[in-house]
Every structure is written in C-alpha cells, then in structure tokens.
Image (cartoon, coloured by chain):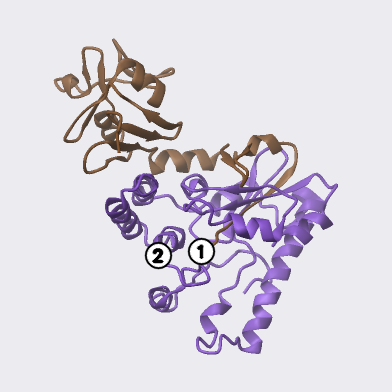
Chain colours: A purple, B brown
Amino acid sequence: MWQALYEELAGQNFIVIAVAMDSREGDAVPWIEAAKPTYPTLIDREHLMAELFGVVNVPQAIWIDEAGRIVRPAEAAGAYEGFRKMNRATREMPDEVARLTTDARATYVDAVKDWVRRGPESVHALPAESARAHLPAFTEDMATAQAMFKLGQFLLRHGEKEEGNRWLGEASRRHPDSWCIWRQSAGINDTGLAALPEFWERVDALGEKRYYLPVDMKGMP
Amino acid sequence: MLWPMATLLTDAGEFEVPQAEVSDDALWLSAREAEEATGWVAKPEGLCKGEHCVPLPPGREREFVRGQRVNAAALWRHLGQPALRSDRGHVWVLAPSARDRSEALRSLQAPDFTLPDASGRPHSLSDYRGKKIFLVTWASW
C-alpha cells in the first residue's frame, strides 16, 4: 500500500515500517506475500502499537525523525471513512465520496513527501509543543483494556478459547473507542474482513462521531 | 496442557515463574523471579527498581514482602498499575500505568520496540535510527 511512496523517496534517508496488528498466527502473511513490499512489515500480535503509541484503528501512522523524535503522533494515515456512505447492497460509492477518499489519500501522501524533503521546515512536521498537544490521551481504562487484550490473546494462543474471548470482550468494553480491539475480536466474513452485520451496527451507532478521528492537516476532510 | 506454576506477561516479555505461589489476588514470586520478570527487588528501604524505591506502607509490609518473596500483584496495585490474572491464576499480566505511558510519550522520544517480520526475523525501531521513519499500522481484518 505504501510501496510507491517508499520507492519515490528511496535514497532520501527514509523508511516505511508497516506493522500488521494481527493476533492470529498467519493472518497477515498472504497479504504480505501478495504485496511483496521492499520495506519491513512486522507482525504485532499483542497490539503493542496500541500500548505504546495509542493506536486505536488502522491505518494510523506515526512520523519519527532521524533522532527518534515523534513529529506526528498516531493519526489516521490518509484514510477517509467514505465506506460509511457506500451503498451496502451494491457496494457502490457516491462520486463525491469517492473523490473525497482519493483526495484525502493524496493530500496525506503529499504531506509525507514534503516532510521527507524538507524535514523540520515542513509545515507537517509538528514542533514539540504542537506534537505534544496532538498526543492521544491515555486513560487507566485504556491501560487496563490493553492488559486484558494481552491476557485474552495469550489464552487464545494456548487453546483456552472461552476465557480468552471473555477477556477480549471485557477489553473492548473498557476501551470502546478502540476499533483495533473490537475488530480483532469480531467475527470475520468469507473475505477475512471483520465486516459482518455487527460491524455495520457498531459503525451506525457512531452517529455523528467519526470512524477515523479527524486529522489536523490542511486539506483533509 | 501442562502449565508451569504461572506465566507472567510484562513489558519485558513472557516469563515462566515455577516458584510462584498464587492465592486470590496475590502473586508471590521468589526474589529472583521478581527481579528477572519485573526488575523490582526488596531492600531495607522498601521495594526498589534501579535507583527508584517505594517505601512499604507501615503496618502493611507483609502484604508485599515475606522473607525472600515479593507479592508482585500487590506492588502493582499499590502503584496504580494494571495487574490481571486468569481465572485459574496460571497467567498474569503486569502492565505499566496509563500515566507512565503518557509521560513516556510526552518526551516525544519514540518508545523502542522489537517485533518479528513474516519470516520471524526481529526488527527494532532503533535499528532504523538516523532515518525518517513512517511507522504505519494495518491489519488483515
């Protein structure tokens, strides 16, 4: 998904590290084998990205400079929730929504390129105070939820299905804003997506709330 | 399936703690297990991790330390950190608090981590220090 961007910026001291937040052994592998990215793709079965960086959905990205400093905390990586306005029977997207989706992606990718070329001079590289202000808020419920998730996944890996699933459900109730916890634990359809009717019910229940939190970047919907 | 006395999941990884004794909400580790899995050591001034020591609440010392044993779960709760156990008490998670996570992020230094790629080879974020990193999540689901 990021291969073209990576190739375009090759030789500019830039790397993409993709992290698959996939707890079930092997789920991410066919995707990696099909895409054959030349950048590293890592498997995060315990959702460490959520624990460390506050990731609650995918795709979310974190920009880190040469000194290891976060210049943009976790945020939606060019994703727009156009799928909410899709016709669910025909899977067709209204033209306007399709355009917003394409534009969001292009705006975000251009921002990454601008940062790679201009470093701290880029308007998209947040100065320290601003980067801090954009950090996701960590609550004790979130920390407890991630611990429950870790316990549940450990039990599932060791064949203790009933109790494992119970902890995952408990984790999602503690941290309902995490789509990562919910979708990882949800049933999947025949294409491997956690998009069964209960997913759509949960999306509809958002009402005016966003599926991807808005990104503070000029030109993003 | 055969279990060791308990498996302990901490930030530092997965530890088997065969000498652990579990009762209700207590997880009594041997001094060595406590140090290896959690970094905490009982000293005359209290429980210490490196230079940082936490005095034991007066009159409640035996909730935390008995002889050579440390109740890691009691320490975790005392510090306001999540401590969870499986129903049978054979798996425990001792996690950092939201406050600690938050403070770590406020430094803006990206926390290091190590994860495997599809072939099992480990990669650490710090392996790529010196480059701009676009760290991006995705999932099959």
Question: Image height check: is B126 above or below A126?
Answer: above
Q: Quadrant of residue B112?
A: top right
Tell me the SS state at disc 2.
loop
Q: Residue at x 52, y 42 (%)?
A: B105
Tell me the SS state at disc 1.
loop
Instruction: Give the letter of the chain under mark 2.
Output: A
Q: In the rendering, at what x and y percent does residue B101 appear?
A: 45, 41
Q: Label 2 amino acid? A: Ala
Q: In the rendering, at what x and y percent does residue B133 appear?
A: 70, 46
Kindly give the residue lying farthest to the front in the view shown: B1
The numbered mark at residue A186 is 2
Q: In the rendering, at what x and y percent does residue A206 appear?
A: 41, 75
Q: CA distance from mark 1 to mark 2?
A: 9 Å
**Local crowd size for mark 1, using a 10 Å CA cut-off: few (<14), some (14–19), many (≥20):** many
Question: Image height check: is A66 above or below A172?
Answer: above
Q: Residue at x 40, y 34 (%)?
A: B10
**Given contact means CB atoms under 8 Å apart, are the residues at marks 1 and 2 in contact?**
yes
The residue lying toward the viewer, choosing from B100 and A155, is A155
Instruction: Give the letter of the chain under mark 1.
Output: B
Q: Which residue is mark 1?
A: B141
Q: Going by the image, does A180 lie left or right of B22?
A: right
Quarter of the picture holding the N terminus of chain A: bottom right
Question: Image height check: is B120 above or below A99?
Answer: above
Q: Quadrant of residue B75?
A: top left
Q: Residue at x 70, y 52 (%)?
A: A125
Q: Label 1 amino acid? A: Trp
